[in-house]
Amino acid sequence: MSREAELATVREQVSILADQVVHLVDLISRQDRAGRDSTPAQEKLAVLESLMWRLHARQKRLKTTLH
């Protein structure tokens, strides 16, 4: 896979994860307002944020090698 294709793939993955993070933040907010336990959703959110930031760092490294 070329660096350009890899960068495009990483961008897409970051975008997908960012959408999932937004969804979980909304879910946690709704659960909190309803007085329900949001711990499982918060744990998933922490994992997704970690993955998103790792992919973001990889994206930055790929950009650097292309420029």
Image (cartoon, grey):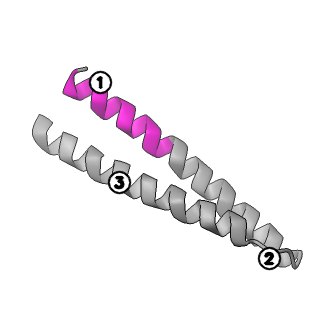
Q: Residues within 10 Å of mark 3 (few under 14, many from 20)?
A: few
**Precedes in sequence: disc 2 or disc 3:** 2
Task: Give the answer, above or below, for where 14 lies relative to 38.
Answer: above
Q: Residue 23 location in percent, x, y?
A: 67, 54
Assess whether residue 37 is covered by the magenta stretch. no
- Gap between marks 3 and 1 measured at Cα: 18 Å
Q: Quadrant of the N terminus?
A: top left
Assess whether residue 6 is covered by the magenta stretch. yes
Q: Amino acid at mark 3?
A: Arg
Q: Nearer the observer, disc 3 or disc 1? A: 3
Pointer 1: what residue?
5
Pointer 3: what residue?
54
Answer whether residue 54 is visible to the viewer in this image. yes
Pointer 2: what residue?
32
Q: Residue 55 location in percent, x, y?
A: 36, 48
Q: In the current view of this chain or complex, which residue is farthest to the right?
A: 34
Prevailing secondary structure of the magenta residues: helix
**Residue extent of the magenta highlight:** 2-15
Q: Is residue 5 left or right of residue 53?
A: left
Q: Residue at x 20, y 28 (%)?
A: 3
